[in-house]
Amino acid sequence: MCRNVLILFSLNLILLLLSCAPRRVELPEYEYVDIKEVIYSKNNISRIDSKFSIAYEKDDTILKGEGILNISKNGDLTLRVYSFGFLAFELISENGIIKNTPIIDKKSASMLAKGLKDCFFWWDLIDFDVEENGEIYILKEQSRELWVDRKTIFPLKQLISLTDGRKLQIYYEEPMENNEIWFPSKIKIEHLSSSITLEIKDILFSVGV
């Protein structure tokens, strides 16, 4: 009797886990669609709210935590990073005014705010040129270069030129879908000898002004 109950319990558990597993859905293809039309079609997204795990690496040091980011298309954002349940870092940018705790220098705070905005709103390009390189499109704006897959228009890499001549390199991986909007669930941002890796757990796209 106990053995039968155990078997039934195990079967129900397996079915529950399978029902909760992410769906394996193929990325939509845009092979015969104007890439600029696909990019501009995302311009109605005005805000992104996300939760993620975060790992910061510099030299031989690795710091891990959990993060919450609320970011708008105009660059306003609130970033909070928690370590062991405690608030470890907070960055708020509103109307171009940036506040952060603990305090970091103004240049680093500005770089982080711009990097996060361009990283999450990767499609927010204006007056850009398009180059073809095999199976990849390279979209070039004044301070940004974006590599996307030609068939799926999914982002692969982005290069952001900063005002001091340095560059941010951003890598996108592991596509997932939420409410018919595809996004990279793993993002790695590299700058000099440091890197930040985000693994997105939850994300919400808001449409409107």
Image (cartoon, rainbow, N blue to C red):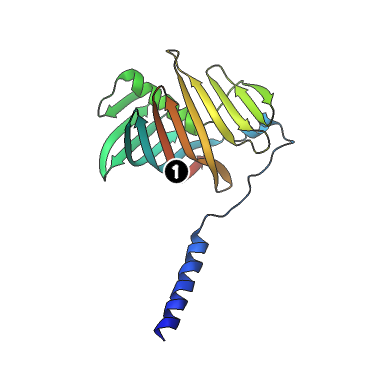
Residue 187 seen in the current view: yes
Q: Is residue 162 above or below residue 82?
A: above
Q: Disc count in the image? A: 1
Residue 193 relative to residue 45: left or right: left
Residue closest to the far right: 32
Task: Label 1: state its secondary structure.
Answer: strand
Residue 128 point in image, percent of width and height: 62, 21
> Residue beneath label 1, please?
200
Residue 15 point in image, percent of width and height: 51, 68
Residue closest to the far bottom: 1
- Residue sitting nearer the eye, 78 or 9: 9
Label 1 environment density (alpha carbons within 10 Å; few <14, some 14–19, many ≥20) = many
Residue 208 seen in the current view: no
- At a point 44% along the width and 16% down the height, the residue shown is 166
- At a point 61% along the width and 31% down the height, the residue shown is 148
Q: Quadrant of residue 183?
A: top right
- At a point 71% along the width and 31% down the height, the residue shown is 34
Q: Is residue 153 above or below residue 131?
A: below
Residue 164 relative to residue 138: left or right: left
- Residue sitting nearer the eye, 158 or 120: 158
Residue 202 relative to residue 61: left or right: right
Q: Quadrant of residue 133?
A: top right
Q: Is residue 97 above or below residue 156?
A: above
Question: Which three-letter amino acid code belongs to the residue tagged 1?
Answer: Ile
**The N terminus lies in quadrant:** bottom left
Residue closest to the far front: 60
- Residue sitting nearer the eye, 59 or 13: 59
Residue 108 relative to residue 40: left or right: left
Residue 75 point in image, percent of width and height: 44, 28
- At a point 38% along the width and 39% down the height, the residue shown is 54
